[in-house]
Image (cartoon, rainbow, N blue to C red):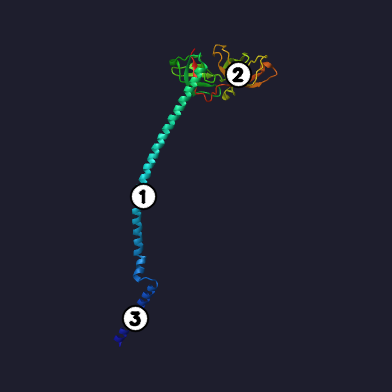
Protein backbone atom coordinates (compact mmCIF):
# COMPACT_ATOMS: atom_id res chain seq x y z
CA UNK A 1 0.00 0.00 0.00
CA UNK A 2 2.74 2.42 0.94
CA UNK A 3 4.59 1.68 -2.29
CA UNK A 4 1.46 2.35 -4.30
CA UNK A 5 0.92 5.67 -2.56
CA UNK A 6 4.46 6.77 -3.37
CA UNK A 7 3.97 6.01 -7.07
CA UNK A 8 0.77 8.03 -7.07
CA UNK A 9 2.48 11.02 -5.42
CA UNK A 10 5.34 10.94 -7.91
CA UNK A 11 2.91 10.71 -10.78
CA UNK A 12 0.97 13.66 -9.41
CA UNK A 13 4.17 15.75 -9.11
CA UNK A 14 5.20 14.91 -12.67
CA UNK A 15 1.77 15.80 -13.93
CA UNK A 16 1.88 19.16 -12.14
CA UNK A 17 5.32 19.90 -13.57
CA UNK A 18 4.16 18.97 -17.10
CA UNK A 19 1.13 21.20 -16.62
CA UNK A 20 3.28 24.10 -15.51
CA UNK A 21 5.60 23.65 -18.49
CA UNK A 22 2.65 23.64 -20.85
CA UNK A 23 1.33 26.84 -19.27
CA UNK A 24 4.74 28.55 -19.48
CA UNK A 25 5.25 27.47 -23.11
CA UNK A 26 1.76 28.61 -24.05
CA UNK A 27 2.23 31.97 -22.30
CA UNK A 28 5.56 32.66 -24.02
CA UNK A 29 4.06 31.81 -27.36
CA UNK A 30 1.37 34.41 -26.72
CA UNK A 31 4.19 36.88 -26.14
CA UNK A 32 5.89 35.76 -29.37
CA UNK A 33 9.00 34.49 -27.64
CA UNK A 34 10.45 31.47 -25.91
CA UNK A 35 11.62 31.19 -22.36
CA UNK A 36 15.19 31.15 -23.57
CA UNK A 37 14.56 34.23 -25.67
CA UNK A 38 13.02 35.94 -22.66
CA UNK A 39 16.03 35.17 -20.54
CA UNK A 40 18.36 36.34 -23.31
CA UNK A 41 16.42 39.57 -23.73
CA UNK A 42 17.27 40.49 -20.16
CA UNK A 43 20.88 39.29 -20.11
CA UNK A 44 22.76 38.71 -23.34
CA UNK A 45 21.05 41.33 -25.53
CA UNK A 46 21.91 44.35 -23.30
CA UNK A 47 25.49 43.15 -23.23
CA UNK A 48 25.51 42.91 -27.01
CA UNK A 49 24.10 46.42 -27.24
CA UNK A 50 26.85 47.74 -24.93
CA UNK A 51 29.54 46.07 -26.99
CA UNK A 52 28.01 47.45 -30.18
CA UNK A 53 27.87 51.01 -28.71
CA UNK A 54 31.49 50.80 -27.52
CA UNK A 55 32.58 49.53 -30.93
CA UNK A 56 30.77 52.40 -32.62
CA UNK A 57 32.42 54.91 -30.23
CA UNK A 58 35.87 53.49 -30.99
CA UNK A 59 35.17 53.66 -34.72
CA UNK A 60 33.88 57.22 -34.42
CA UNK A 61 36.89 58.31 -32.38
CA UNK A 62 39.12 57.40 -35.29
CA UNK A 63 37.20 59.97 -37.29
CA UNK A 64 37.14 62.61 -34.52
CA UNK A 65 40.87 62.59 -33.70
CA UNK A 66 41.95 63.58 -37.23
CA UNK A 67 39.37 66.37 -37.14
CA UNK A 68 40.89 67.69 -33.90
CA UNK A 69 44.36 67.63 -35.46
CA UNK A 70 43.02 69.51 -38.48
CA UNK A 71 41.41 72.14 -36.24
CA UNK A 72 44.67 72.59 -34.35
CA UNK A 73 46.51 73.06 -37.63
CA UNK A 74 44.02 75.66 -38.84
CA UNK A 75 44.17 77.46 -35.49
CA UNK A 76 47.96 77.68 -35.73
CA UNK A 77 47.66 79.01 -39.26
CA UNK A 78 45.16 81.65 -38.14
CA UNK A 79 47.41 82.70 -35.24
CA UNK A 80 50.33 83.06 -37.63
CA UNK A 81 48.22 85.08 -40.05
CA UNK A 82 47.01 87.29 -37.20
CA UNK A 83 50.60 88.02 -36.14
CA UNK A 84 51.49 88.96 -39.72
CA UNK A 85 48.50 91.31 -39.91
CA UNK A 86 49.53 92.95 -36.62
CA UNK A 87 53.03 93.52 -37.97
CA UNK A 88 51.67 94.97 -41.21
CA UNK A 89 49.40 97.31 -39.23
CA UNK A 90 52.31 98.47 -37.07
CA UNK A 91 54.42 99.10 -40.18
CA UNK A 92 51.55 101.02 -41.76
CA UNK A 93 51.06 103.20 -38.67
CA UNK A 94 54.80 103.89 -38.54
CA UNK A 95 54.75 104.90 -42.21
CA UNK A 96 51.83 107.25 -41.52
CA UNK A 97 53.72 108.87 -38.63
CA UNK A 98 56.84 109.32 -40.73
CA UNK A 99 54.77 110.77 -43.57
CA UNK A 100 53.08 113.18 -41.16
CA UNK A 101 56.45 114.26 -39.76
CA UNK A 102 57.88 114.87 -43.23
CA UNK A 103 54.79 116.82 -44.25
CA UNK A 104 54.94 119.05 -41.17
CA UNK A 105 58.66 119.63 -41.65
CA UNK A 106 58.06 120.59 -45.27
CA UNK A 107 55.30 123.01 -44.21
CA UNK A 108 57.63 124.53 -41.64
CA UNK A 109 60.49 125.09 -44.07
CA UNK A 110 58.11 126.53 -46.67
CA UNK A 111 56.49 128.86 -44.15
CA UNK A 112 59.77 130.16 -42.74
CA UNK A 113 62.26 129.79 -45.64
CA UNK A 114 64.44 132.63 -44.34
CA UNK A 115 65.08 130.87 -41.03
CA UNK A 116 67.80 128.31 -40.41
CA UNK A 117 66.08 125.63 -38.41
CA UNK A 118 66.56 122.19 -36.90
CA UNK A 119 63.76 119.61 -36.99
CA UNK A 120 62.98 118.04 -33.62
CA UNK A 121 60.52 115.59 -32.15
CA UNK A 122 58.62 116.18 -28.91
CA UNK A 123 59.53 113.18 -26.76
CA UNK A 124 58.00 114.21 -23.42
CA UNK A 125 55.51 116.62 -21.91
CA UNK A 126 56.37 117.94 -18.45
CA UNK A 127 53.19 119.97 -18.13
CA UNK A 128 51.72 120.35 -14.63
CA UNK A 129 49.45 122.80 -12.80
CA UNK A 130 52.17 125.48 -12.79
CA UNK A 131 54.39 124.88 -15.79
CA UNK A 132 54.10 123.84 -19.40
CA UNK A 133 57.40 122.42 -20.61
CA UNK A 134 58.16 120.13 -23.55
CA UNK A 135 61.22 117.93 -24.02
CA UNK A 136 62.65 117.58 -27.55
CA UNK A 137 65.17 115.09 -28.94
CA UNK A 138 67.85 117.66 -29.87
CA UNK A 139 70.51 119.19 -27.61
CA UNK A 140 74.03 120.60 -27.42
CA UNK A 141 75.40 117.97 -29.77
CA UNK A 142 72.96 119.22 -32.42
CA UNK A 143 73.75 122.90 -31.97
CA UNK A 144 70.82 123.82 -29.73
CA UNK A 145 71.39 126.65 -27.25
CA UNK A 146 69.42 128.22 -24.42
CA UNK A 147 67.17 131.06 -25.60
CA UNK A 148 66.57 129.76 -29.13
CA UNK A 149 63.07 130.22 -30.53
CA UNK A 150 60.97 127.08 -31.11
CA UNK A 151 58.14 127.04 -33.68
CA UNK A 152 55.77 124.61 -35.38
CA UNK A 153 54.08 124.68 -38.78
CA UNK A 154 51.18 126.54 -37.09
CA UNK A 155 53.09 129.18 -35.15
CA UNK A 156 55.05 130.01 -32.02
CA UNK A 157 55.77 127.24 -29.50
CA UNK A 158 58.18 128.85 -27.04
CA UNK A 159 61.92 129.04 -26.41
CA UNK A 160 64.68 126.71 -25.27
CA UNK A 161 65.01 127.01 -21.51
CA UNK A 162 67.45 124.20 -20.72
CA UNK A 163 69.90 122.21 -22.87
CA UNK A 164 71.53 118.81 -22.39
CA UNK A 165 73.75 116.81 -24.72
CA UNK A 166 70.95 115.15 -26.70
CA UNK A 167 67.75 116.71 -25.38
CA UNK A 168 66.39 120.16 -24.53
CA UNK A 169 63.53 121.61 -22.51
CA UNK A 170 61.22 124.12 -24.18
CA UNK A 171 59.18 126.62 -22.16
CA UNK A 172 55.85 127.00 -23.96
CA UNK A 173 54.36 130.47 -24.55
CA UNK A 174 51.27 129.36 -22.63
CA UNK A 175 53.29 128.71 -19.46
CA UNK A 176 52.18 130.95 -16.59
CA UNK A 177 55.71 132.38 -16.41
CA UNK A 178 55.89 133.20 -20.11
CA UNK A 179 55.40 136.63 -21.68
CA UNK A 180 55.61 137.51 -25.40
CA UNK A 181 55.95 140.94 -27.00
CA UNK A 182 53.51 140.92 -29.89
CA UNK A 183 51.48 143.04 -32.22
CA UNK A 184 48.08 142.95 -33.87
CA UNK A 185 48.68 142.09 -37.50
CA UNK A 186 46.13 144.50 -39.02
CA UNK A 187 47.18 147.56 -36.98
CA UNK A 188 50.81 146.71 -36.09
CA UNK A 189 50.06 148.01 -32.57
CA UNK A 190 52.26 146.55 -29.84
CA UNK A 191 50.65 144.39 -27.18
CA UNK A 192 51.76 141.76 -24.67
CA UNK A 193 50.58 138.13 -24.58
CA UNK A 194 51.04 136.37 -21.28
CA UNK A 195 50.55 132.80 -20.14
CA UNK A 196 48.11 132.36 -17.30
CA UNK A 197 46.90 129.55 -15.06
CA UNK A 198 43.51 128.31 -16.13
CA UNK A 199 44.19 129.16 -19.77
CA UNK A 200 47.23 127.04 -20.59
CA UNK A 201 45.22 123.81 -20.59
CA UNK A 202 43.09 125.30 -23.38
CA UNK A 203 46.16 126.49 -25.35
CA UNK A 204 45.13 130.09 -24.66
CA UNK A 205 46.90 133.28 -23.53
CA UNK A 206 45.87 136.62 -22.09
CA UNK A 207 46.42 139.67 -24.32
CA UNK A 208 47.18 142.77 -22.22
CA UNK A 209 48.16 146.43 -22.44
CA UNK A 210 45.86 147.17 -25.34
CA UNK A 211 46.34 150.78 -26.57
CA UNK A 212 43.26 152.93 -25.99
CA UNK A 213 43.10 153.90 -29.65
CA UNK A 214 43.17 150.30 -30.88
CA UNK A 215 39.85 148.67 -31.75
CA UNK A 216 40.53 145.04 -31.04
CA UNK A 217 38.02 142.50 -32.38
CA UNK A 218 37.42 138.76 -32.33
CA UNK A 219 39.25 137.17 -35.23
CA UNK A 220 42.27 139.51 -35.16
CA UNK A 221 45.58 137.73 -35.65
CA UNK A 222 48.43 138.33 -33.23
CA UNK A 223 52.11 137.73 -34.07
CA UNK A 224 55.51 138.30 -32.49
CA UNK A 225 56.87 141.83 -32.72
CA UNK A 226 60.54 140.91 -32.49
CA UNK A 227 60.99 143.22 -29.51
CA UNK A 228 62.56 141.98 -26.31
CA UNK A 229 65.23 139.90 -28.04
CA UNK A 230 63.62 136.52 -27.31
CA UNK A 231 61.49 135.71 -30.34
CA UNK A 232 61.93 136.34 -34.05
CA UNK A 233 59.60 138.86 -35.68
CA UNK A 234 56.46 137.85 -37.58
CA UNK A 235 55.76 134.43 -36.07
CA UNK A 236 52.06 133.76 -35.55
CA UNK A 237 50.99 133.60 -31.90
CA UNK A 238 47.27 133.08 -32.32
CA UNK A 239 43.83 134.57 -32.85
CA UNK A 240 41.66 136.77 -30.62
CA UNK A 241 38.63 134.76 -29.49
CA UNK A 242 37.25 137.10 -26.81
CA UNK A 243 37.56 140.77 -25.84
CA UNK A 244 36.76 141.65 -22.23
CA UNK A 245 35.88 145.34 -21.83
CA UNK A 246 36.47 147.09 -18.49
CA UNK A 247 35.48 150.48 -17.10
CA UNK A 248 39.15 151.31 -16.96
CA UNK A 249 40.55 150.93 -20.49
CA UNK A 250 43.90 149.91 -19.03
CA UNK A 251 42.20 146.84 -17.58
CA UNK A 252 40.60 145.77 -20.85
CA UNK A 253 42.07 142.50 -22.08
CA UNK A 254 41.49 139.79 -24.64
CA UNK A 255 41.82 136.00 -24.85
CA UNK A 256 44.04 134.63 -27.60
CA UNK A 257 43.70 131.08 -28.85
CA UNK A 258 47.21 130.03 -29.77
CA UNK A 259 47.80 128.80 -33.31
CA UNK A 260 49.52 125.76 -31.84
CA UNK A 261 47.50 123.04 -30.15
CA UNK A 262 49.94 122.02 -27.44
CA UNK A 263 47.93 118.92 -26.51
CA UNK A 264 48.70 117.29 -29.88
CA UNK A 265 52.10 118.82 -30.70
CA UNK A 266 54.61 116.25 -32.01
CA UNK A 267 57.14 118.02 -34.22
CA UNK A 268 58.86 121.40 -33.89
CA UNK A 269 61.64 123.47 -35.43
CA UNK A 270 64.39 125.07 -33.38
CA UNK A 271 65.47 128.38 -34.93
CA UNK A 272 69.27 128.21 -34.94
CA UNK A 273 69.89 131.84 -35.94
Q: Residues within 10 Å of mark 3 (few under 14, many from 20)?
A: few
Quickly name the residue at label 2. 221
Residue situated in front as seen by the camera: 147 or 31? 31
* N-term mark: 3 or 1: 3
Residue 184's spot in the image, x, y percent?
61, 16
Q: Residues within 10 Å of mark 2 (few under 14, many from 20)?
A: many
* N-term mark: 2 or 1: 1
The label shown at residue 15 is 3
Q: Residue at x 30, y 86 (%)?
A: 4
What SS does tag 3 mark?
Answer: helix
Residue lying farthest to the front in this orientation = 110
Reply above or below: 20 against 58: below
Residue lying farthest to the right in this orientation = 247
What SS does tag 2 mark?
Answer: strand
Quickly name the residue at label 1. 64
- Residue 233: image quadrant is top right
Amino acid sequence: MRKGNSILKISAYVLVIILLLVIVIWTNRQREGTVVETVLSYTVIPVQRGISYFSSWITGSHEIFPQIDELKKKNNELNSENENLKKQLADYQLALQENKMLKEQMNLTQKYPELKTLSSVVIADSTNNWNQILVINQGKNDGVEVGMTVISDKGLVGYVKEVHDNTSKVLCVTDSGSSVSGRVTKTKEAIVCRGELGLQEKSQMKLMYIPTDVSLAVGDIVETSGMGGVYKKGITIGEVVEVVEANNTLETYAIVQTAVDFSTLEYVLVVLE
